[in-house]
Amino acid sequence: MAAEKSGKVSFQLKTPKGTRDWMGADMILRERIFETITSVFKRHGGTSLDTPVFELKEILAGKYGEDSKLIYDLADQGGELCALRYDLTVPFARWLAMNTSIQQIKRYQLAKVYRRDQPAVAKGRMREFFQCDFDTAGTYDPMVPDAEILRIICRVEVFEALGLRNEITIKLNHRKILDGLFAVAGVPAEKIRSISSAVDKLDKLPWADVKKEMEEKGLSPEVADKIGEYVMLHGGRELLDTLKSDAQLLANDDVAKGLADLDLLFRYTDALEVTDKISFDLSLARGLDYYTGLIYEVVAPISAPQSQGKSKKRGSNDDDLSNDPSVGVGSLAAGGRYDNLVNMFAPKRAMPCVGVSFGVERVFTLLKARLEKEKATLRSSEVDVFVMAFGGKTFNGFLLERMAIASELWRAGIKAEYQAKVKPRLPQQFKAAEAGGVPIAVILGEDELAAGKVRLKVLGLPDGHPDKEGSLIPKDDLVSEVKKLLADSSGDLASAAKKLSI
Amino acid sequence: MAAEKSGKVSFQLKTPKGTRDWMGADMILRERIFETITSVFKRHGGTSLDTPVFELKEILAGKYGEDSKLIYDLADQGGELCALRYDLTVPFARWLAMNTSIQQIKRYQLAKVYRRDQPAVAKGRMREFFQCDFDTAGTYDPMVPDAEILRIICRVEVFEALGLRNEITIKLNHRKILDGLFAVAGVPAEKIRSISSAVDKLDKLPWADVKKEMEEKGLSPEVADKIGEYVMLHGGRELLDTLKSDAQLLANDDVAKGLADLDLLFRYTDALEVTDKISFDLSLARGLDYYTGLIYEVVAPISAPQSQGKSKKRGSNDDDLSNDPSVGVGSLAAGGRYDNLVNMFAPKRAMPCVGVSFGVERVFTLLKARLEKEKATLRSSEVDVFVMAFGGKTFNGFLLERMAIASELWRAGIKAEYQAKVKPRLPQQFKAAEAGGVPIAVILGEDELAAGKVRLKVLGLPDGHPDKEGSLIPKDDLVSEVKKLLADSSGDLASAAKKLSI
């Protein structure tokens, strides 16, 4: 304990770069978001999977392209080489490959992932951050699971439950359509992924810059312009008809297949009541290589100010590195269909997958800003009863009596506290209860206790309120009286935390 | 994607050594244990803290003695040197040192910690494992928070809620008493920690072996025997009186201080109704250096078979390395008072702490064994309604109709599923519902739908039950009828998961 002797600590007291502690009101808000998301996942038959925070290095190798440099490795201390997980998708694919008895599954996972990226703390982009994933794996009839994922994203579902429903749009595209139209425009097969990544920048760069990048990547201006015509298109399902009337496009097998998928999808999203939230956007490309079909991301105007034109997206390496506070927090969720990822671990296992990942920190940033605007506060603990005592000169503090009463409340499942002092003063105890936002006080006095009674008092009532002074009740009735108060507590008694709509 | 081409994967498909995936019934049981523990922590006014999974290496350095070699380091990839957290106590102390406005707090944290130890999977000892910690930090009147921690451990609290109350004992000792009696017996000050660690082995080794270790560490046989006399003592609070009658012991300041603490403690544990669970055991030493007062661990006969005589404990390096399946899973919880740990980060900050850590994997192992004995099963998803359809030759599968009905149920917050096939066969659908343990079916037929009706059926009823065939209800009443069935479901309908007492 050198520090103690010298009276100094020789290093900076902090969490590692891009990480943070969660405590108090932030933690309560975050847990409420998790509960909401989990309840939606369960409503759709999801089962929970938890995987280790690190995987064998070989499992992660070759899955993230250029972004692999952002993977955190564990030190080689003898034994296996491991790395922190970069997302929840690859561990899920590894699990599917290992568990060969699984034919079909809906799994969800809420867990931290790790990326050695440049942090932008104010916008909620961290090196350690949460992802909340729901994925459906297995062979089903086409587009049926895909449509359910879109339903999970919006409409009485995650964002609705979080009070953000009216603010979100699902931008949607299909990898086969995108790849097909590149081919039709004249992009050589080996350049399709790299041109796709140029298109993906259209939400941050003007067309001229993207075109320039395409020319640098070897396309002629004519081919680039042809792509430009297509990827500027976005709209609702009517865009499907526009594309279907383009004979040159339709002649491409990939395009035809992708359009047929979307035709089917829109029938299902009608039945599931989510079509009105979907914007079919040919400029959406998504960074990750492993998508094979539908791709989508969720944006909210509130998350991407209109001055920016388009929203930012998560995931790919150089997305939204800006620290400009006028730039939104980015996409709130994203995902797609990836039919071949499991084959990287189990080449002979047919296990097509489709899923979505919610960026909880970004949702958190939005909700927190709204709460601050509404001046709503969240309590950091949930104690309902503060057990106090007071008395005259001979007062011994009634610590044992306060303990016994708290014991009785705890036994009944009631959240209770008392001040950990032998002889506390009454104002101190009221102050502590107030600081914690505790709604009910039980007050022990000498005469009252001798008569077998205690005072029960709702805290925070305005002066002049008829119940301001509380009431003397038989000590034996305490638990039932407290339960009655708590049951009635949706109105007066409710703490700010409980009143909050989410 | 070399794997795909060659049809082979060149590495072993597994999780890293000492780690595991959690899924299905195991996951549900684990989550139920977490919910139980969390609700108890909240009942006592705990607020939730979440810290990063890794800390700066300097934060962990010098805190774990010999066990430091078990720390997982992150690779040096440029920037700060970090390591995975080894426990939740040191990150809490780091957080307290950083947040100087905090004067008093009860915090809890449920999170994974990491130790490069020899795993013993069958017993629930892993390299990645959960700890569930509750700690009270700040200056309070003596022993008041300590007594509350003991209350949290047992009695209408964690183990009672888990149905293990009658099976546990809290072994308890006091570092000051232990250190004082070593001094009285003649152990030189500089040898006290190392002799203490020899005593700590008394639950695995016979006295003769421990004595031998003491002699190897430089004690005379007489001094060792004197220690032996003391550390064999265990019992209830009456042992306090025995020790107080020993004038030589009482003359030692540390012993006198420790005995006064225990005197006070037992008054409080009486008020909190936990005294009968406490065994005052002078052989309990605990591995970690940082304890300064009360120390305790929770054992259950079921976790440490009687043939072993004494139970194993978690935490110190060479504890229960045995793979002998007859050895119990070890202590279920442990903790103590550590008044100086925060000073290692903030030398001038007075922040005494006392806490407990629950070994969830061990509790899990016990509960799982009991469930298996009782042949109880846990469902891996919680779906309440399976939406099915059937029809004759012209049957189109009613997929859109099934989707619309599921949408209606989801909107009402009801957990629902349908088979993701355009034209499923009815027996397939019943089989899927049965496999998932889904308690209710909604069945769509052509004639019924035309008449605006659907069939609602409770699944799994015995033949001849009057409700076996279900009933036709107006489609518009579906949500309210399903809610009625679910509200009545505590009896017949309840799934195994819901029936389970924990």
Image: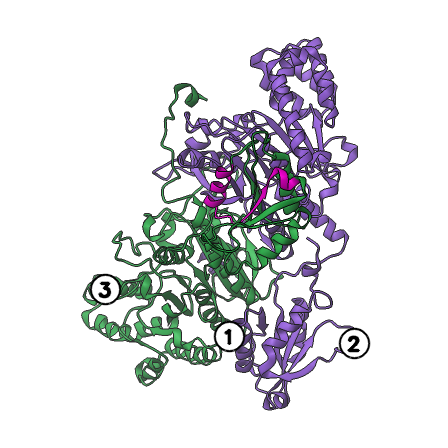
Chain colours: A green, B purple
Label 2 crowd (10 A; few <14 / some 14-19 / many >=20): few
- Disc 1 marks which residue? A144
Q: Quadrant of residue A420?
A: top right
Label 1 crowd (10 A; few <14 / some 14-19 / many >=20): some
Q: In this orientation, does residue B129 appear?
A: no
Residue at mark 1 shares a chain with residue at mark 2: no
Q: Quadrant of residue A87?
A: bottom left
What amino acid type is highlighted by mark number 2? His
**Relative depth, front residue between B260 and B284:** B260
**Relative depth, front residue between A372 and A89:** A372
Q: Residue at x 38, y 26 (%)?
A: A9
Q: Percent x, y for residue A303?
A: 33, 61
Q: Residue B119, relative to residue B458: is it above or below?
A: above
Looking at the image, is mark 1 or mark 3 nearer the viewer? 3
- Disc 2 marks which residue? B465
Q: CA distance from mark 1 to mark 2?
A: 36 Å
